[in-house]
Image (cartoon, rainbow, N blue to C red):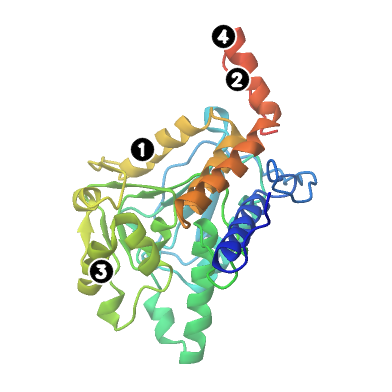
Amino acid sequence: MAAAAPGTLGSLQVGRTRLVAACCARLGPGWRLPGSWTTPRVTWARGWVPAAGGAAPRRSYSPEVNTEDELRVRYLEEENRGIVVLGINRAYAKNSFSKNLVKMLSKAVDALKSDKKVRTIIVRSEVPGIFCAGADLKERVKMNSSEVGPFVSKLRSVINEIGFLWSVSYIDSFFANLPVPTIAAIDGLALGGGLELALACDIRVAASSAKMGLVETKLAIIPGGGGTQRLPRAIGMSLAKELIFSARVLDGQEAKAVGLISHVLEQNQEGDAAYRKALDLAREFLPQGPVAMRVAKLAINQGMEVDLVTGLAIEEACYAQTVLTKDRLEGLLAFKEKRSPRYKGE
């Protein structure tokens, strides 16, 4: 067979190979490319075991400032084992992003992304009527111009870790991302960075009474946490421009109509209708093969950022990683024995 032609075609083929190789690299140690694709193979690293958690406690509102409690990380147990809930709890500041909250989110995400016992992550608010109001403007006013840029960069980095960002500078370089499904439960106000946080999640559900919008142009700035990139990908370029240019705020029904969220629900007395729906979805995900879930997310995320031919190559590379797993064999055996599979993520 003739060697790849030099020039544009050869460069495209090389670039495509690097993209697919990088895709497998994002799967972590132990994954390799199928067939003629080649890359070194090593073993998975073991993740740390999270502290035991209980059933989700009732939300509590406190006007007292306690920075240690601004983010609550709960590992659910029993039939919900594998679900982790990140609860934002800055009631006195409408859950706005402060330096401390961003630091806590970063620390939590770093721990979660390496923990193979985690199956699905729900991002919610512990404060009634509020999801996240965006940046803490009271703190922002006290920053000088040289501080604003680094803070926004840090916030963007944390949001990208929760979501996914393809580096446009280095074709085979990726920001770390949470490899498991993420669900944003929007039971209240989600403005600016708050909506950007939700946009970084794989699935968004909201109460009909929730309010959502990228309102940064009102402050003579633009969305800086990925909003100008993720909103057009979610609802289309023209409508995204309209919403950002106008700083328009949508309710849950309007957000569902434009495709910003997947599910809208009437709010309940407890004020947690979206969270309950998110829990239902997470429970639907739990029985599936853990490796397959991670690889499916990776294939979809990365495939959406490239041409179809490269995307299909990424899918091929990802599919190959499931073939050699113990879970695949367990799935076939369970089907033969007419029982539920017992997947271990191996």
Instruction: Please give the name of the residue rendered at 65% of the width and 15% of the height, measured from the top-left corner.
Output: 333
Residue at disc 2, secondary structure? loop
Horizontal arrangement in the rendering, residue 209 relative to residue 302 (left or right): left
User: Where is residue 18 shown, x and y percent of the image?
Assistant: 64, 59
Horizontal arrangement in the rendering, residue 46 relative to residue 225 (left or right): right
Kind of residue sitting beneath label 2: Pro
**Which numbered disc covers residue 277?**
1
Mark sitting earlier along the chain (2/1): 1
Horizontal arrangement in the rendering, residue 108 relative to residue 226 (left or right): right
**Which numbered disc covers residue 241?**
3
Mark sitting earlier along the chain (4/3): 3
Residue at disc 3, secondary structure? helix
Mark closer to the observer (2, 3): 3
Instruction: Using the rendered image of the protein, determine whether residue 83 is visible from the camera's viewpoint.
Output: no
Kind of residue sitting beneath label 1: Lys
Kind of residue sitting beneath label 3: Lys
Horizontal arrangement in the rendering, residue 59 relative to residue 168 (left or right): left
